[in-house]
Amino acid sequence: MLCMALSITDKSWKEAKRKNGFVIYTKQVAGYETKMFKLDATFENVKIAKIAGIIRDADKTEDWISDVIEGELISKTSDDKWLSYLLFDLPWPLDQREMALDHDITTNTPEEVFIKLTVNNKTPQKE
């Protein structure tokens, strides 16, 4: 499960890295080998609508998620909820990896947006 911009009040999150105004937190989730992570960042002089617009363009995912070489919309429930396919180009000796990712965007205020990205294990991967 991948999450961005979640509440910091949950004490189970541990700070993993801080760089260039970004703070990454991680926590272990029961039943999962990989840690959950969240990103906290403040952007000045940037409109939240512009950031959300970039994220809402599922076919442009490779522009904002590192190592994604293909992003494609699978289905869309609303402007704020959709399922996409991602193909990651990983460095040798790893093979490319693919996943289906649920996106859920909530705009709390004009200055705050909550973006939740969750791996969808029920969706079959592309052939």
Image (cartoon, grey):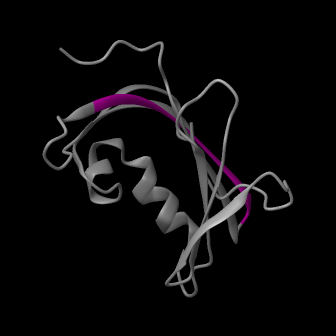
Q: Quadrant of the C terminus?
A: top left
Left/right placement of residue 22 relative to residue 15 reads left
Q: Give the quadrant of residue 84.
A: top left
Let me know if residue 116 appears in the view: no
Report the magenta stretch's main SS: strand
Q: Nearer the viewer, residue 91 or 57?
A: 91
**Residue 61 locus on image (x, y percent):** 32, 49
* Location of the N terminus (image quadrant): top right
What residue appears at the point 49 percent right and 23 percent down from the top-left corner?
A: 120
Which residue sits at x=48%, y=67%? 50
Describe residue 62's horizontal placement relative to residue 43 as left or right. left
Residue 103 belongs to the span the image colors magenta = yes
What's the residue at 17%, 50% (across, down)? 91
Q: Quadrant of residue 14?
A: bottom right
Q: Residue furthest left?
A: 92
Residue 32: in magenta span: no
Question: From the viewer's perspective, is residue 48 above or below residue 121?
Answer: below
Instruction: Report the magenta residues as a range.
Output: 98-109
Which residue is more in the foreground, 77 or 92? 92
In x, y percent, where is residue 69?
18, 46
Asked whether the viewer can see residue 72, the reply is yes
Q: Position of residue 101 (x, y in %)?
A: 44, 32
Q: How many marks?
A: 0
For residue 106, above or below residue 76: below
Which quadrant holds residue 11?
A: bottom right
Q: For this view, does 80 lie left or right of residue 50?
A: right
